[in-house]
């Protein structure tokens, strides 16, 4: 006959061990990840994809950027979905001339733009025969080698003046759109490349713009193909940009695609990547 188990006097019964994992722990982990993503996107960095060629040659359609949120402070336009319990900007720092800036379009809606900041409050700007003048002086620019943009599904040859189109082919048969390229240098030494497609475009000769207090003057690097502060909002342009619409400063290109990838064919995701553009900073 089997004997009964002996329980020592004074021994406490051990509580059952809690099982690790489970629905509650998974839920807490997912909530933490969600909150971390919200904080990261709201206050540190946010992704942005380039939808147009207005910032060629620095940015191509299909470039994916991280945008730094902290340099200019925060407003409701820099918060996800425009949700913020305050007006104006907090922790604000002024942007610098030459910064590549992502901002909310001030004409309404929820569309974000990216342009280069050219004019600060109080600056006087004018475009004469395609050349930029700042505070009564021409901004130096030097003609450099043509910019050759590879033709791809998301980057066809787009010219404001079709008669000026130039397509060149290399020995391997690869096609490129050719654009006149210049090196422009702002006061203070900030330099960058711009494109000049034509001599007498609608923005090649402008009035004198005086930037109001609290506003900024934005321009695309693809000077003849950018609806920016040279055009009023009534005509689809940006006009003067109020400071509260600033979202952040372009930080780094973390991915770029030429548009040839197909979601149903994962191996095309690699062949479509522009690997040489990944990691470029601003």
Image (cartoon, helix red, strand yellow):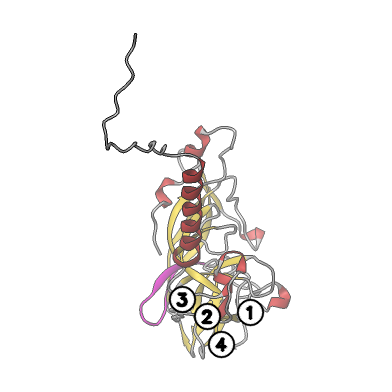
Quick one: label 3 or label 2, which is nearer the N terminus? 3
Residue wearing tag 2: 89
Q: Residue at x 52, y 80 (%)?
A: 89
Inter-mark Cα distance, 1 to 4: 10 Å
Q: Are marks 3 and 2 in contact (CB under 8 Å)?
A: yes
Left or right of 189, for residue 272? right
Secondary structure, magenta segment, majority class: strand
Q: Nearer the viewer, residue 9 or 161?
A: 9
Residue 239 is labelled as 1
Residue 157 is labelled as none
> x and y percent of residue 273 in the render?
47, 44
Residue wearing tag 4: 211
Quick one: label 2 or label 1, which is nearer the N terminus? 2
Inter-mark Cα distance, 3 to 1: 20 Å
> x and y percent of residue 234 in the render?
73, 77
Q: Quadrant of the N terminus?
A: top left
Quick one: label 3 or label 1, which is nearer the N terminus? 3
Residue 72 is labelled as 3
Q: Nearer the viewer, residue 158 or 262?
A: 262
Question: Which-is-in-front pick, marks 3 and 1?
Answer: 3
């Amino acid at each position: 006959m089997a004997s009964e188990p002996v329980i020592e006097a004074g021994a406490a019964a051990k509580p059952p061990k809690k099982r690790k994992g489970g629905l509650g722990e998974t839920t807490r982990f997912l909530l933490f990840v969600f909150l971390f993503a919200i904080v990261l996107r709201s206050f540190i960095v946010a992704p942005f994809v380039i939808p147009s060629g207005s910032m060629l040659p620095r940015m191509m359609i299909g470039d994916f950027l991280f945008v730094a949120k902290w340099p200019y402070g925060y407003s409701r336009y820099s918060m996800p979905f425009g949700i913020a319990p305050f007006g104006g900007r907090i922790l604000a720092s002024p942007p610098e001339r030459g910064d590549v800036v992502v901002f909310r379009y001030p004409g309404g809606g929820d569309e974000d733009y990216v342009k280069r900041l050219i004019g600060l409050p109080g600056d006087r700007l004018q475009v004469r025969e395609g050349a930029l003048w700042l505070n009564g002086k021409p901004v130096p620019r030097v003609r450099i080698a043509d910019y050759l943009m590879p033709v791809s599904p998301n980057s066809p040859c787009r010219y404001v003046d079709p008669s000026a189109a130039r397509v060149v082919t290399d020995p391997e048969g690869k096609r490129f759109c050719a654009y006149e390229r210049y090196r422009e240098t702002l006061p203070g030494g900030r330099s960058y490349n711009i494109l000049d497609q034509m001599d007498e475009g609608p923005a090649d000769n402008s009035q004198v713009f005086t930037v109001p207090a609290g506003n900024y003057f934005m321009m695309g690097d693809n000077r003849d193909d950018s609806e920016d502060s040279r055009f009023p909002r009534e005509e689809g342009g940006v006009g003067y940009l109020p400071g509260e619409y600033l979202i952040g400063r372009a930080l780094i290109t973390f991915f770029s695609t030429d548009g040839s990838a197909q979601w149903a064919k994962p191996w095309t995701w690699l062949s479509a990547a522009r690997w040489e553009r990944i990691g470029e900073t601003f």
